[in-house]
């Protein structure tokens, strides 16, 4: 073995150190060079990105781009009237808006559009019955439906406004001094020049009320506050208000005061300055609506009847009596109008309020007819937002009288027999004897009621917690039903009680309970809304799956779907059969459907209805029907059955 030479080893180590030092310097130079190249590349990319952003900014700020984002084509399309002598429509007497157009006083409300002699409703081509706003645009009538959409009335009839902004939910229509039309909608503030084929969105926030200010400025208020919008496209100014929800607006040019109706009361103040603000009137905290005339804000104090208050810009308040309890106040062209039970009133300087138009006879007390039941020539109606009414047959229709049943709130179903009326309501079961509420104390009443059925031993009631049988037994999912919420009930001739729930179909035979649920593949949809026992079969209506028919028992049981009804949302209780055997169903958004006499298939009927949402059906007279009554969320339709058969 060789010996280790310390001199040689030392020289080798020094050489290695020098080599490592040179290598490190090279690596550092390479790293610095690479970093520089990376920085150069990033700088180049950044410059390109900045140029791209600048180009996009210039493009976005260009007049062409701004115009494309705010202005779109507008088309007025003539509507096709489904006019039918076999249909009559009835709404309520409420008035939502009015305007003088071409010398005629037009009103928009629960019965459509009317000038006292003419009436426009779905029979005349309107999409729905209830109208929210009306205005004059160069002496042309423009209107907006409560359900959405707007249009105008020409010599050829109603025309619907359409654009790529979609179906606007319009709340206010105002004509400017220059003849432009301002359209206040949930989707924003829009402007249309008369005769133009374009519609411009001026502001994107929701609008419920509009007031015109000096120099062409526009005060626009909605659910998100009050804004001053420049007609020339300047900056939008926010106005501080006691509450962001603005229901009504008016500007008093004489006092330079802007008035606003809010949930906290009537506010007022100057709209000028960089940060304008309105404060609640010191004596205007007891109203949230009103109108401005002669420099005074007129309002109806809450919880008071036959009174009207006037607020002044100096903080004053005066009150005066009214002929009846008014529901709304309106101002048009300096005149004050009021809506009441008797009709439309106008305030005369000398005589006070004068009735200028009587309410239409036969109007409903409320619009949303959620339940119907007929007995003889009397038709009972239950309303979604509370109350019952009795319709007595007259020569040209029904005369309605409200029933003072305070507990009958949120009526879901009605059953009339032998002079007694049962009402399933959100406050439980209500019973009427000879048209008057009877105080009952149901020891086992489980709360909100949804359905009713006459059985051999009495009336069964469907509750949110199960089915209450006439013998006061409450059966629920615990006993074998598919669910607790009994939204539909039907009795069969053999004594079986069918039960429809959101979870499937159940039935009760004496003490035996059975069920069919969605997982078995028999039901098109688990939510059962209406049932009809025909003796040899059961028709099952669903909310989202249409109609299916069940036949047979046990091993011979079969289920047949009506494929033409697939996807239909059939409303609770809205299924009925007429004497010829045809079955009628009411749907959500798809109107009225009817089967052939053999119930082999269903078809949609092209009939004018107050609304495409049908919630209730009834035949009148009950023993020998001549008419079908159709309850919707916007009123009632009466269809002559004889004329209907002649069209087949």
Image: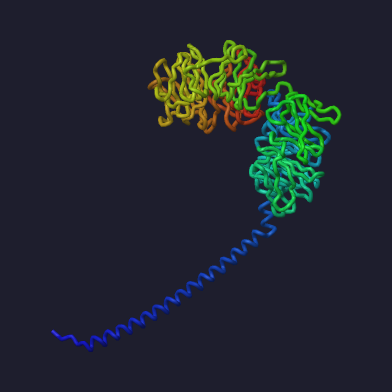
Q: On the rendered image, what quadrant is the C terminus found in?
A: top right
Residue at horizontal 68 percent and vertical 60 percent from the top? 62
Q: In this view, does 242 lie above or below 35?
A: above
> Horizontal and vertical percent for residue 209?
71, 41
Which one is in front, 303 or 477? Answer: 303
Colour scheme of the rendered structure: rainbow
Q: Residue at x 69, y 29 (%)?
A: 110
* Labels in figure, total: 0
In the image, residue 535 lies at what x, y percent?
49, 16
Give the camera-side residue of 486 and 338.
338
Q: In percent of the image, x 69 and y 48: which residue is there?
A: 239
Outermost residue toward the bottom? 7
Residue reaching furthest right?
Answer: 350
Q: x and y percent of residue 100 in the render?
A: 80, 35
218 and 91: which is toward the camera = 218
Looking at this rendering, what residue extends furthest in the left direction?
1
Residue in the foreground of this view, choosing between 254 and 550: 254
Q: Can residue 141 be seen in this view?
A: no
Q: Is residue 365 left or right of residue 526?
A: right
Whether residue 473 is visible here, answered yes or no, is yes
């Amino acid at each position: 073995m060789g010996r280790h030479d310390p001199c040689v080893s030392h020289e080798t180590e020094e050489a290695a150190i020098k080599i490592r030092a040179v290598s490190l310097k090279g690596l550092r130079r390479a790293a610095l060079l690479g970093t520089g190249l990376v920085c150069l590349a990033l700088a180049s990319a950044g410059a390109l990105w900045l140029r791209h952003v600048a180009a996009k900014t210039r493009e976005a700020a260009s007049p062409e781009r701004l115009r494309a984002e705010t202005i779109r084509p507008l088309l007025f399309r003539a509507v096709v009237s489904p006019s039918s002598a076999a249909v009559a429509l009835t709404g309520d007497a409420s008035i939502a808006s009015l305007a003088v157009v071409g010398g005629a006083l037009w009103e928009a409300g629960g019965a459509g559009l009317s000038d006292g002699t003419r009436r426009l409703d779905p029979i005349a081509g309107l999409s729905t019955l209830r109208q929210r706003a009306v205005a004059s645009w160069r002496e042309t009538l423009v209107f907006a439906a409560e359900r959405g959409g707007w249009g105008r009335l020409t010599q050829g009839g109603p025309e619907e406004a359409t654009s790529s902004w979609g179906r606007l939910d319009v709340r206010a229509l105002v004509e400017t001094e220059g003849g432009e039309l301002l359209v206040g909608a949930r989707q924003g503030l829009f402007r249309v020049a008369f005769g133009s084929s374009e519609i411009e969105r001026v502001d994107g926030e929701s609008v419920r009320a509009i007031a015109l200010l000096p120099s062409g400025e526009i005060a626009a208020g909605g659910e998100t506050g009050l804004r001053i919008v420049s007609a020339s496209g300047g900056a939008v100014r926010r106005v501080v208000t006691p509450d962001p929800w603005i229901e009504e607006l008016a500007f008093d040019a004489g006092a330079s005061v802007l008035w606003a109706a809010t949930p906290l009361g009537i506010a007022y103040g100057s709209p000028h300055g960089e940060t304008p603000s309105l404060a609640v009137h010191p004596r205007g905290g007891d109203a949230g609506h009103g109108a401005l005339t002669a420099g005074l804000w007129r309002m109806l104090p809450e919880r008071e009847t036959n009174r009207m208050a006037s607020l002044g810009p100096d903080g004053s308040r005066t009150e005066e009596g009214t002929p009846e309890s008014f529901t709304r106040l309106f101002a048009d062209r300096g005149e004050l109008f009021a809506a009441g039970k008797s009709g439309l009133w106008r305030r005369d300087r000398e005589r006070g309020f004068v009735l200028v138009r009587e309410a239409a006879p036969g109007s409903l007390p409320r619009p949303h007819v959620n339940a119907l039941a007929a007995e003889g020539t009397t038709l009972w109606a239950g309303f979604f937002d509370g109350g019952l009414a009795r319709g007595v047959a007259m020569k040209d229709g029904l005369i309605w009288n409200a029933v003072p049943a305070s507990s009958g709130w949120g009526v879901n179903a009605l059953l009339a027999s032998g002079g007694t009326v049962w009402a399933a309501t959100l406050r439980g079961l209500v019973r009427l004897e000879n048209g008057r509420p009877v105080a009952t104390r149901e020891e086992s009443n489980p709360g909100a009621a949804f359905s009713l059925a006459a059985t051999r031993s009495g009336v069964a009631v469907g509750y949110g917690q199960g089915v209450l049988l006439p013998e006061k037994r409450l059966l629920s999912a615990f006993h074998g039903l598919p669910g607790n919420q009994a939204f539909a009930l039907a009795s069969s001739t053999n004594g079986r009680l069918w039960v429809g729930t959101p979870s499937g179909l159940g039935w009760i035979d004496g003490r035996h309970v059975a069920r069919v649920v969605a997982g078995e593949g028999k039901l098109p949809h688990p939510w059962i809304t209406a049932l009809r026992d025909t003796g040899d079969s059961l028709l099952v209506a669903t909310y989202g799956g249409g109609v299916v028919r069940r036949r047979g028992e046990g091993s011979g049981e079969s289920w047949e779907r009506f494929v033409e009804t697939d996807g239909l949302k059939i409303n609770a209780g809205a299924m009925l059969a007429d004497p010829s055997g045809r079955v009628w169903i009411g749907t959500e958004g798809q109107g009225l459907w009817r089967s052939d006499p053999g119930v082999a298939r269903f078809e949609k009927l092209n009939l004018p209805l107050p609304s495409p949402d049908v919630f209730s059906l009834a035949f009148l007279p009950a023993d020998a029907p001549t008419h079908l009554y159709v309850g919707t969320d916007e009123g009632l339709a009466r269809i002559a059955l004889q004329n209907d058969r002649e069209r087949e």
